[in-house]
Image (cartoon, helix red, strand yellow):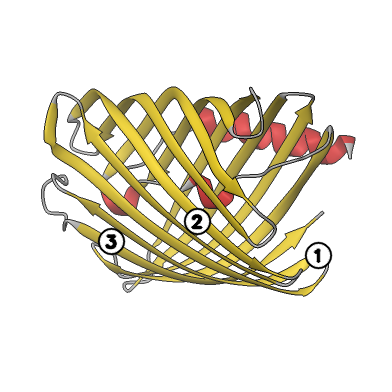
Amino acid sequence: MSRLRTFLLSLFFLLTASEGLYCQVNTEKMRLEREKSGISGNVKFEYSVDMGNSELTEIDLKPNLVSRFGRHQFFMLNDLSRVYSEGGNIISKAFSHLRYNFHFDSSVIGELFTQAEYNKSLNLEHRYLFGGGVRLIPFNRENVKAALGISVMNEEEKLESGELTRLVRGSSYIYLEVVRGDNFALGNTVYIQPAFEDLEDYRVLDDAELEIWIFKSLAITNSLHYRYDSKPPADLKHYDLEIKNGLKFKF
């Protein structure tokens, strides 16, 4: 376990130090939870096809880690991708997210987070953000779980053209998950992220994922990712649609 922890921590700092990306990322569907103190994680492999601003084939590797000590919980999410375009070009992208949770009780959780991303296919040199907020759990039953989140974040984005934007955004989400037994889970998240200085500048993300566990530690995954930007950079469409099929390993 010590070697694994060293590898994942090194990966996080490497990604955070690299250049970031223009894209909303649904950290809710990637969220890791622990009921008891300790450390665990998972590694996910995905194959995807993108339509919209990008016509791409993508291969993803996502190593994630969570640790909990009493009311304190940290989780780290990473995404390393190789993207192949129609012309045969190869584009790499990276994403890293670190979040701290403090559990006031079972239904109210404080959150602090920071994130770095990179994605050349969307013409953005980097995106960095940090922020905080509150997460509410209206119900958490055996088969159905719901969560609401309200956060404020500072965001910096730089286009490849050199245009730099710094602003404060709200980030609200609602998450619903349905579970049947030990081998079926379906989750959906909707994010809304308006800019406080210009409410006509907003982003919406709808993300759905199905997991079917064929073994205790191995699942087949299918997901759909739709992102809408009311004010995208020049020459980009307002939306992106992404469909992914993959395998998920849990340890």
Of 67 and 118, nearer the camera is 67
| Label 1 SS | loop
Up-down: is 194 above or below 82?
Answer: above
Q: Quadrant of the N terminus?
A: top right
CB within 8 Å, label 1 to label 3: no
Q: CA distance from mark 2 to mark 1?
A: 23 Å
Q: Nearer the viewer, mark 1 or mark 3?
A: 1
The residue indicated by pointer 1 is 217
Residue type indicated by callout 2: Leu
The residue indicated by pointer 2 is 176
User: Of the numbered discs in the image, which one, if any, rests on residue 240?
Assistant: 3
What residue do we see at 55% from left, 59% from top? Answer: 177
Q: How many badges with numbers are in the image? A: 3
Is residue 23 in sight in this rendering? no
Quarter of the rendering containing residue 236:
bottom left
Q: Quadrant of the C terminus?
A: bottom right
Up-down: is 182 above or below 227?
Answer: below
Spot occupied by residue 49 in the image (x, y as percentages of width and height) = 41, 72
Nearest to N terminus: mark 2 or mark 3: 2
Spot occupied by residue 82 in the image (x, y as percentages of width and height) = 50, 59
Residue type indicated by callout 1: Ser
Q: Nearer the viewer, mark 2 or mark 1?
A: 2
Is residue 173 in sight in this rendering? yes
102 lies left or right of 41:
left
Q: Nearer the viewer, mark 2 or mark 3?
A: 2
